[in-house]
Amino acid sequence: LLPITPLQQGSQILAVVQACQLVVLVDIDQMVLDFLPVGYIYDDPFKRWEAGQRLMLAAIQARLDARTGDRAEAASQADGLDETVIAALSRAFDDGSLDDGMRNQLLLLSSEGAISETLTVVDPQALREARRALRVRVATALADRLMPLVGTAHWRRPYDASIAAMAPRALANTALAL
């Protein structure tokens, strides 16, 4: 176990002293919900996106793990990670500092090809099913936020190639694809 030092009430510092360490964090949903892994700069959009991608990858990996080994425990972990992803994406929709372009990027799931590069053994069918399961869970849980985006019916208006029009259009297309 690593030493954890109380800094002030409600916060702690975790000393990571080796190049590679396994750290299990319990009851810290706030950090995950913010898409902010330990040590990352809070206002760095790329790091927030990258942490979100890792969180979604962990949810997909948990679904793949549920197909083998201790299925009940892995399925429970997958459900918990799905809920964490959904809560984090909900917070992204509520975050007034994010524009539609960033919301779109946070909502995008990695492609099957990109995910397969992280796997030791690739089962294309299982990967497709796990990715689809997360996509369906996200789309169902966030339907009240996604449907108004789809409802903008941007495809019925004349095409606007301006940068200001691209982000809302991309977000609506991603919502529609979910």
Image: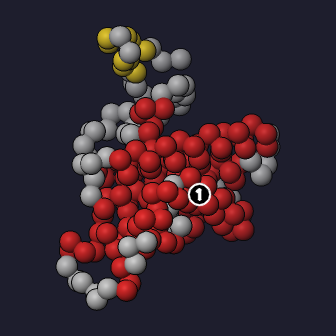
Visible in this render: residue 174?
no
Q: Position of residue 68 (x, y in %)?
A: 79, 49
Is 111 drawn above or below residue 10 in the view shown? Answer: below
Q: Residues within 10 Å of mark 1 (few under 14, many from 20)?
A: few
Q: Amino acid at mark 1?
A: Thr
Visible in this render: residue 107?
yes
Instruction: Name the side, left or right, on which 102 lies relative to 16.
Output: left
Q: Position of residue 43 (x, y in %)?
A: 24, 43
Instruction: Please state which of residues 92 and 113 is positioned toward the viewer in this rendering.
Output: 92
Q: How is the image coloured?
A: secondary structure
The quarter of the displayed image where residue 118 is located: bottom right
Is 171 drawn above or below residue 133 in the view shown? Answer: below
Residue at the spot 44% in from the left edge and 71% down from the top edge: 150
Instruction: Name the side, left or right, on which 136 lies relative to 53.
Output: right
Instruction: Name the side, left or right, on which 98 lies relative to 87.
Output: left
The quarter of the displayed image where residue 33 is located: top left
Residue at the spot 45% in from the left edge and 57% down from the top edge: 145
Residue at the spot 45% in from the left edge and 37% down from the top edge: 32
Q: Position of residue 67 (x, y in %)?
A: 77, 52
The quarter of the displayed image where residue 42 is located: top left
Instruction: Please state which of residues 33 and 157 is positioned toward the viewer in this rendering.
Output: 157
Which residue has dot 1 on it?
140
Instruction: Please state which of residues 33 and 20 is positioned toward the viewer in this rendering.
Output: 33
- The residue lying furthest to the bottom in this view is 158
Q: Position of residue 116 (x, y in %)?
A: 59, 63
Number of on-image labels: 1
